Amino acid sequence: MTNALKPIHFKPKNGVRIVVWSAFAFILFALPALFTSSFALTLLCLTGIAAVACMSYNMLLGQTGMLSFGHAVYTGLGTFVAIHAMNKIVGGWAIPMWMIPLVGGVAGLAFGAVLGYVTTRKAGTPFSMITLGVGELVFASALMFPEFFGGEAGINSNRTAGKDMWVNFGLSFGPQLQVYYLIALYLFACTIAMYAFTQTPLGRIANAVRDNPERAEFVGYDTRWVRYLVLMVSSFFAGVAGGLTAVNVEAATADLLHGVRSGSYLLFTFLGGVGFFFGPIIGSVLLVFSLVVLSEYTKAWQLYVGIVFLIMVVYAPGGFSALIMLNLRRVKYGEWRKMRWPYAGMFFFGVFALWGMAAIVEMAYQLKVVEGSGAALTVMKVPLNCQSTASWLIALAVLALGSVGFEYWRRKFVAVWDSGEERIAEAIKKAEAAIV
Amino acid sequence: MSVLNGVSYGLLLFMLSAGLTLIFSMMGVLNFAHASFYMLGAYFAYQVSSWSNFWVGLLIAPILVALLGGLFERYVLRKTHKFGHVPELLVTFGLSFVILEIVQLIWGRTSVDYPVPPSMSGSLFKVFDSTFQMYRGFMMLVAILMLVCLFLILKKTRIGLVIQAALTHPDTTEALGHNVPRVFAIVFAAGCALAGLAGVIGGNAFITEPGMAQSVGAIIFVVIVVGGMGSLAGALVASLLIGLMQTFAVGLDWSFAGGLARLGMDITAETPGYSLLKLKLSQVAPILPFLLLVVMLVVRPKGIMGTRDD
């Protein structure tokens, strides 16, 4: 998050930027060719939607410093309005299906304008508490109005409706591949729009409000108005993500609005990293991976995610994107080689510690279901028995050994890292002196 | 009768929000996991009382919760202090996640049978036809005792004096030779103990299940915002208000439609907004605290007794 002051050069054509965006577009275009199975395509669709949602969330958390516990309200309400719009298409309205995400976006914007007016009255911690309360309010209300939200069962729609209308250009949106390209297109457009937003005066002032609200106020900006505007823009993009969900799954249930979903946007956006624009995209990949893939392997996946999250908050508050960028910086200054051994040691013992922990957790879970599915289980190919003392002792021993080894290498790593930091600071100082 | 039930529920809410307010006003940390400590209190008490009896649980469970809270403050929360308030809030958010999963890991995903002790399960007295449960009376007694103790400790003892000083002038207090981080840890542990105690007596009055933290967590946040951030007196007023409001609302089946029909208006399913009008007060009871929050923010953003308007 902290940028060292750099001399600003006027660059009319930013070559790097063109390369990066073209590469992004190419990757989005080529991914279905690499991952051809229908399961992979489903994952890609979910990831694309989550990326839009997480980036819109990062507008609040990373760029304006607003920790919201109620972001699913805007994505979820976007989905519901979009589903109703889709049902209007089924009923014969001539809205092109590819505009449904925009309908969701407008709905998100509208709800952001109404609810955000209340929530943005406060900043900081009170803002977080209020978003939580408003999120609960919306979720509980959803069950009270079955006419609109469909009660427990939710409401369904059909994305192939209106496929014969000329406005759809012959696209039926029946095949998942068409849906993927729709999502990819929206993801690309939204990413550009959200990146452009960070460069606008409002985006800059949002950063000022994040870093020093008093000063921003003193310079003459109404911080509450800034928060309100950013929240509306953010909920527009959240609504777009909700609309994409509507097209993707063709159904909406009340748990789209639930606090757990808001919590997972927060969790994974943070894990991806709030300090860099691309951080939430990493977060969305992790989100879909945990929710869909990890949950297949273990029932305790939320515990693992929670523990990883705790460790990251304490030791790497910049998230994975900051870890990547910090290591790239090491490479740039030729410091990375010195860290090879500490990294290898930490990885080696980390695997053991992780295995020990996972074995204990999985055996504890297995104890609950012994009657149904027996006491035997395997943790990463190692057969264990949750009712035998030996298994527990092995797991504990491996965990202890792994932890001790990890801590040993971690201390070495910290020493190497800190000395490297000093050398880099010196190198930067020298470079600056050379310019002057 | 509803009044007494409402007051006892309100006092329980206050026990929770008092600890949260103390921690918040002292350290500036909103302990997102506060309701999780409440849940832990209930589960510890259930476990201890299944081994021995309720009274031992009443004594041990809050101490265990306080220990866990203190350890968390010392070894996790303190490390994030230098990063600012957002990571502090995030770390407690992560903790609430982990506690929920561990509780499910140990005690399962369904509710556990944590009964009211037999000596307390009778009724205390009768008014007209409805009875007032003896256990409700006990809850009120514990809550009030705790309130008095809290007040006396804060106002009359030396440690209370140091806490009050550290609240407003941490640097000066530190300069005078007091270990402010340790005071923080003590306050955090004490706040957790209050939550744990509330869990012990609330867990069997209501229900002990993994969802209990989330259902009460959002409401104590409402209490704190409505009462005014960092104001203990405000938290008391707001807890009682919400406790009474919810208890009354559950028992009433008023609706706009019924009221308008009494006024001679013809309300049918075709009337615009019928789905809103037909809602009974008992149906909207769960969202009343949150509606109160919204109304309060629009009318008086600083809360009932708040002094800060940020």
Image (tube, rainbow, N blue to C red):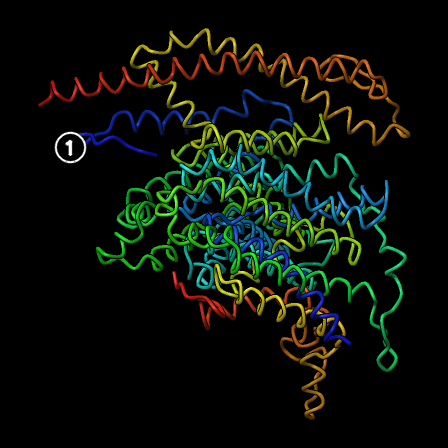
Q: Disc 1 designates what residue? A: A10
**Looking at the image, can residue A100 be seen?**
no
How crowded pointer 1 is (Cα within 10 Å; few <14, some 14-19, many 20+) is rated as: few
Q: How many marks?
A: 1
**Looking at the image, can residue A276 be seen?**
yes
Circle 1: element type: loop
Q: Position of residue B95 (x, y in %)?
A: 59, 39
Residue lying at the far bottom in this picture: please name it. B264
Q: Position of residue A246 (x, y in %)?
A: 59, 47
Q: Position of residue B156 (x, y in %)?
A: 53, 59
Residue lying at the far left in this picture: please name it. A436
Q: Is residue A68 left or right of residue A381?
A: left
Residue type at mark 1? Answer: Phe
Q: What subunit carries mark 1?
A: A
Q: Is residue A63 above or below residue A281?
A: below
Depth check: B302 or A84 in front?
B302
Q: Position of residue B4 (x, y in %)?
A: 74, 73
Q: Measuring 81% from the left and 63% from the top, which residue is drawn there? A: B135
Quadrant housing residue A32:
top right
Quadrant housing residue A415:
top left
Quadrant housing residue A403:
top right
Q: Is residue A189 left or right of residue A137?
A: left
Indicate the quadrant containing the C terminus of chain B: top left, top right, bottom left or bottom right: bottom left
Q: Measuring 54% from the left and 38% from the top, which residue is drawn there? A: B73
Q: Is residue A54 above or below residue B120?
A: above
Depth check: B120 or A256 in front?
B120
Indicate the quadrant containing the N terminus of chain B: top left, top right, bottom left or bottom right: bottom right
Q: Is residue B24 left or right of residue A199?
A: right
